[in-house]
């Protein structure tokens, strides 16, 4: 029976350059999420300011 050592393969793949690129991707995703949340807060504040009721889910149901 063969004994596979998967950790060795992962250690070879995770070079400093790849780790740096993965970090940059996660930072970018975090920035995008923060922007999306800020836009949502602005839209929610605008709705509350106008005293409009949010649309019900019934309006979005497909016929």
Image (spheres, rainbow, N blue to C red):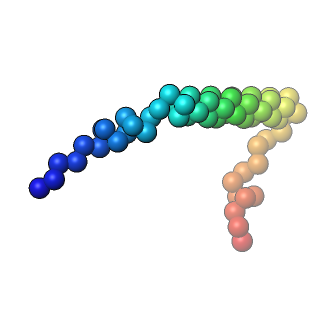
Q: Quadrant of the N terminus?
A: bottom left
Instruction: Choose between 32 and 56: the one closer to the eye.
Output: 32
Residue 20 picture quarter: top right
Residue 17 in the figure: left or right of residue 5: right
Number of marks in picture: 0
Q: Position of residue 37 (x, y in %)?
A: 70, 31
Residue 45 in the figure: left or right of residue 26: right
Of all residues, the one furthest to the right in this rendering is 50
Of all residues, the one furthest to the bottom in this rendering is 63
Q: Is residue 60 visible in this depiction of the protein? A: yes
Q: Residue at x 69, y 62 (%)?
A: 61
Instruction: Choose between 24 and 49: the one closer to the eye.
Output: 24
Q: Residue at x 17, y 48 (%)?
A: 3
Q: Position of residue 19 (x, y in %)?
A: 51, 31
Q: Position of residue 6 (x, y in %)?
A: 29, 43
Q: Position of residue 4 (x, y in %)?
A: 22, 48
Considering only vertical position in the picture, is 37 above or below 1? above
Residue 5 in the figure: left or right of residue 38: left
Residue 31 picture quarter: top right
Q: Is residue 48 visible in this depiction of the protein? A: no
Q: Residue at x 66, y 32 (%)?
A: 28
Q: Quadrant of the C terminus?
A: bottom right
Q: Residue at x 24, y 43 (%)?
A: 5
């Amino acid at each position: 029976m063969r004994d596979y050592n998967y950790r060795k393969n992962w250690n070879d793949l995770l070079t400093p350059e790849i780790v740096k690129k993965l970090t940059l991707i996660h930072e970018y995703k975090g920035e995008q999420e923060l922007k999306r949340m800020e836009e949502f807060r602005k839209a929610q504040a605008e709705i509350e300011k106008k005293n409009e009721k949010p649309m019900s889910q019934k309006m979005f149901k497909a016929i």
